[in-house]
Each structure stands twice: as C-alpha cells, then as structure tokens.
Amino acid sequence: MIDNPFFTKHYSTPHETAPFDQIHLEDYEPAMLEGIKQDDAFIQSIVDNPEPPTFDNTVAVTSPDDLLERVTKVFFNLLSAETCDAMDALAQKMSPILTEHANNIMFNQRFFERVKAVHEQHWELTPEEATLLEKSYDGFIRAGAALDEEHKTRLREINAELSQLTLLFSQNNLKETNAFQLHITDETQLAGLPDTAREAAALAAKEAGKEGWLFTLQAPSYGPFMTYADDRELRRQLYMAKNTICIKDNEQNNTGIVRRIVNLRLERAQLLGYRCHADYVLKNRMAESVENVNRLLDQLLEAYMEPARREVQEITDLAREQQGPDFQLMPWDFSYYGHKLKMQRYDIDAEMLRPYFELARVKEGVFGLATKLYGITFRENRDIPVYHPDVTAYEVLDQDGSFLAVLYTDFFPRTGKQAGAWMTSYKDQWISKEDGNSRPQVSLVMNFTKPTETKPALLTLGEVETFLHEFGHALHGIFANTRFSALSGTNVYWDFVELPSQIMENWAVEPDFLNTFARHYQTGEPIPQELIDRIVASRNFNVAYACIRQVSFCLLDMAFYTLQEPFEGDLIEFENRAWQRAQLFEPVPGTCMTVQFSHIMAGGYSAGYYSYKWAEVLDADAFSVFQQTGIFDRETAQRFRDCILSRGGTEHPMTLYRRFRGGEPTIDALLKRNGISPTPR
C-alpha cells in the first residue's frame, strides 16, 4: 500500500494527473478494494447522520476521497486503450465485485429513505440542484430500491451477470479482430492499392516478422483494401472475415452472450415495471418513447430510401459496364465501384487528399478551429505522464490564459486497443468550496492511419471528420462548468451527447476551415482551390446510402430492445427480419452484425443507437446558425458554449437547445444539407 500510487489522493504530477509511469498491474485490485471500503464508510456516515435529511447533507455531500473513482477510471479506460491478457483477467475478476458494490449502495434502504425524504419535500433549489435531486432519486428507483427483497436479490444477480457478459463480449470482439491477418506475398495481388496502403501493409508485415504485406481488420487497413484492391476474391475474403467476427464455432462466439444480454435486460426492465428495455432506457432520453424513435426512423426511411436505391443502382450500372451485364454487385464490391463512380463524377478520392492531411497539421487545424471559435489554446506538457509512447498530453488554456483542462491524444491502432474512436475522461469537472473549480482531464482515443518508414501519418478526409467528431466530445468535457461532477461535461441524455461532436464534422468540408491547415506534407503548398471545390461538390456522394445504413443499425437495435418476451430464436434470422426494410443488398449467408455490434451490446447504446440520427437532426439545425452568422463567428460560438457545452446535464437538453437556437429543431436543415427533397407533410 505504501508503494501504491493510487493511495496518494493528491498526485505529485502536473494538475494531479494520473501517474501512469508509476502504476503497475498489481496496484489496481488493492486500490479498488480499499476504495470500496472507503465508499461504504462514506455512505454509512450519511445514513447515520442524526440530522434530518436535507439536500446538502444527503444529496450534495461528496466523499472526502475519490479513490474508487480514480482507480476505476484509469483501469477501465486502459482496458479499452492499452489492455493485455492479465488486465482482461483482472477485469473479469473485479467486475462482479464492483457491480455488487454498486448494488449495495442502491439497495441501501436507509440511504434511499433519506433521498426519498428530500425528494418529497419542497426545497428552494437552483435548476442544477433540482436536476441532481431528481437524478439521484430516479437512480434509486431505476436501480430497484423500491422493490421487495426477493426482486432486489434477482436484480443483483442480473446486474452482476450483465457486467460479466458485456465485458466478455468486448474481449471476444477484440480477440477475433486481432486474430485475422491477410498475408500477401505475391505483389500482383496488390493491384489497385495506393502506395500508402502498400507501405502500411509492408510495415505491418515487418513488425510481425513476415515477408510481404499484411492486412488486418483494423479500419486503416480494412477500409483502403475494400476501396482499392482489384482482386475481388481477396476483397470477398476480407469482407467475410470482418463480417463473421464472433459468429464462428470457437471460444469467441458471441451468439449465446447476445441472447443472454438481451434477455437479462428485458427481465430487468420488466422487474422495474416497464414493458421492455427500450421503455426503460427512453424514460431518460430526449426522444422519450419508442413511438418517437420510430417516427424519426420512418421519416428518414421515407426521405432517404429511394435516393439510396438510386445510388446503389448507379454503382451497379457502372460495375456492369466494366464487368458485363450479368455481374451481381455484392457488399464487398460496393466501396470499390463506388470509388470508381466518385472518380468519374468528381475526380476525387481519399488518396488525393491524404498528402494535404498530415496528422500534425490536421491537429493544428482542429486545435486552431477551437481557438478561432472559443479563444482557447493548447500547450503540450511533456511532464504530464502518459500510458503509451503514442500518447501526447496538453494543457488547455482559456481565452484569458487560465487553465481549463488536460487533454490526452492517442491516435494509432495497436493490438491492445479496441477498434473505433472515442472520447473519455480520467477526471470530471466540479466546483466545491474545498477545491474551487476543479478542472477536467479528458482523452481522445482513435485508430488513424499510422506513419510508415517513408511517410508521416497521412489521414483521409473521413479520418479528419472522425477527429473533429471526437474533438467535439472533448470540448463538451473541457468546457464543463457545473457544480456537480455527476452533471458535468458529457453526463447528459444519451441522444443529446452526440450534438457537440456531430456539429464539429460540419467544418470538415468548409473551404475557409480547410485553408487554415491543409498543406502538402512535402511541398508545403496549400490545398488547391479546385480540390476544395471537388470536396464540396462530392460531399453528398452516397449520402442516402450512408443514412439508410445507419437507420438499419437503429432498426436492429430497437428490434432487440422492444421485445417483450425472451429471445430464443435464431440470431441471424432475427437480424435479417429486423432491418429488412432498410437493406439495400441481399444478406450474405453466414454473416452477422449483432455479435460484433459493441455499441448496443457492450457500449452503452442499447435502445440508443438512434441517438446518432437524432443528434444529426440537432447538429444540422444548430450549424445552420453558424452558416447564417459565419462559420468562425465568436458570438455564436460563445452562445453555443454557454448554453450547451458548459452546462452539461444541469437542465433538460431541449431547454438548453432552445436557449441556444431560439426554438425546437426540425429535420429540414438535415434534408437541405444532404440535398434530399423534403417529403410532403
């Protein structure tokens, strides 16, 4: 315990950041167990308080030490960003213990009675205090505090099993992703691939101690291969490998895990008095009901399905021109021929843009955008410990030079990192008499194209958009300015959390933004205006197809979580029925999305994947204000910061949105942005 860095409350690091360089695997378990003890003692001090329960002595009171939160934030963040077999095993061991601890708090009858007593009284509270009180009371109710002992016991069992299953689901997904390698030694099989993809594959092979070229299922490897490789059979092999993750007859098969997760969530919802898991989830969402979610999905299907079919037909026609009239376009052909059609129409592709999107310059551009909008600046601090050599730590300073936050960036894929991109937090923001305004520590984790032996990291436009997206989440955390950490930053309704991220993507195709950073990595020449014009002209290429693809995922999610009877059927058959009306290709036998759909099974988006489309309506509507006032307009940006980014979850999100926008959003701005004709109302 003496050598365990977690037992020092105030780290001797800049801004008391996590001392990653001092943390060892054996430090986690004792710190978690001690944190549980401290939590138990703290809760006991609340329930033993002889004073009548008040907001201040029951709801707003905070622990003198946040040991458990400090250690679990580090552990579970690294479990996603830098894991290993030993960490995976420790997670399996500690997850049920931590779940049981959380259950003990929420099932503490004396604690619940105190919170209930406060909730039933009429207090003079600020909107933020009233929100915290409602969230605290509702948290107890949704956790089962009002159930009888028999049902509480069953709920404990459900929560414990779910914590194990969701963890195992993710671990299986990562292992299956890492297990596949397409090893090529015949250079003729690389036909069509650009130099960047070839060099990355050569580097991957060299790092694996192999000759030739190595392609994986990681996005920077998989995406270019499916877009450029002329060898159709290899594209098919890679597609099948990607789309049969965790469905094969091996230890990583997630079929039974999915069935169990879905049924446990249904059972939990019904124990708590809801028809289905979706009803349970949507009670605390902007959408509020299954009917409202379905209404949005129906609107999108009505507006986008026919344009999407036309897009697929146009790509099919091109493929048949080149391959013959009997050619059948398959999913592993879509990106390949879609790219060829885009080249015909706009003479533009991702490889043309890569030289202008060197990661270092993109980072300068994204950080510079925040400076233009909000006046904040980013200063690298090498004294802040990091958990991997790829990670960089920055101090974020406000327009007056005061300290705002710590930001970590982690850009490249590796075997210990989950796929995808995300923002997370190592410390939330709060305000207290003891600490003043305690500022946050946030992290951006991505899987971008790596540097090669001859080139720096050169991104695609899609990766630039991903950077902007996750950076928007980071700004939500960075600008947090609330009294309570439980309401700060991204602690908002799930279908509101994507607004700050998705609105940032709008700048990716704005010429005035591109001109601030897009320069050729070798010559330093700015990106040509004609290339920018082609980017803008092509921005809506296959936009309807992309929308319908997202809607199909939403339909699948809602199909599982609106079930009112336990799911016992065939997983692939259920999947095909669930999203049939949004499918643009016939299903490929043997493939399955559900078993690798981490968002809805293990990532917090169960009955919530619609949030991306919900927030897209919001972001298009909100960005239309910037289009009217100027995309760098500081007054509009300050209003967005004050009304939304800094307020976290302190009020209902529609209240915050109306305060910024002056009214409620409509789908019209999204349809206009995408060039889709509005359907008659």
Image: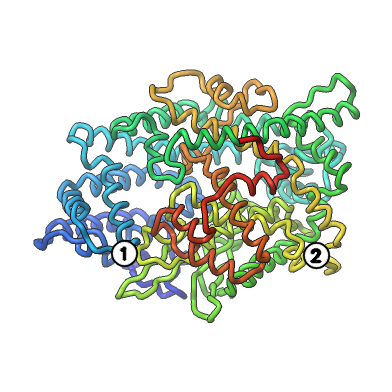
**Residue 461 percent across, percent down from the top left:** 73, 53
Looking at this view, is 172 or 148 the one in front? 148
Q: Is mark 1 in CB contact (under 8 Å) with mark 2?
A: no
Q: Nearer the viewer, mark 1 or mark 2?
A: 1
Near mark 1 (Cα within 10 A), the count class, few <14, some 14-19 or many ≥20, is few
Residue placed furthest toward the front: 681
The image quadrant of residue 632 is bottom right
Looking at this view, is 466 or 15 the one in front? 466
Residue placed furthest toward the bottom: 400
Q: Is residue 129 left or right of residue 328?
A: left
| Residue drawn 83% across the image and 69% down it | 524
Q: Which residue is mark 2?
A: 521
The image quadrant of residue 394 is bottom right
Looking at this view, is 258 or 95 the one in front? 258
| Residue drawn 23% across the image and 36% down it | 152
Q: Which residue is mark 1?
A: 126
Q: Is residue 235 left or right of residue 137?
A: right
**Residue 220 percent across, percent down from the top left:** 69, 47
State the CA–CA distance, disc 1 to disc 2. Answer: 52 Å
Q: Quadrant of the N terminus?
A: bottom left
Which amino acid, by three-letter code, is at mark 2?
Tyr
**Residue 572 percent across, percent down from the top left:** 56, 22
| Residue drawn 90% across the image and 29% down it | 322
Q: Is residue 497 left or right of residue 277?
A: right
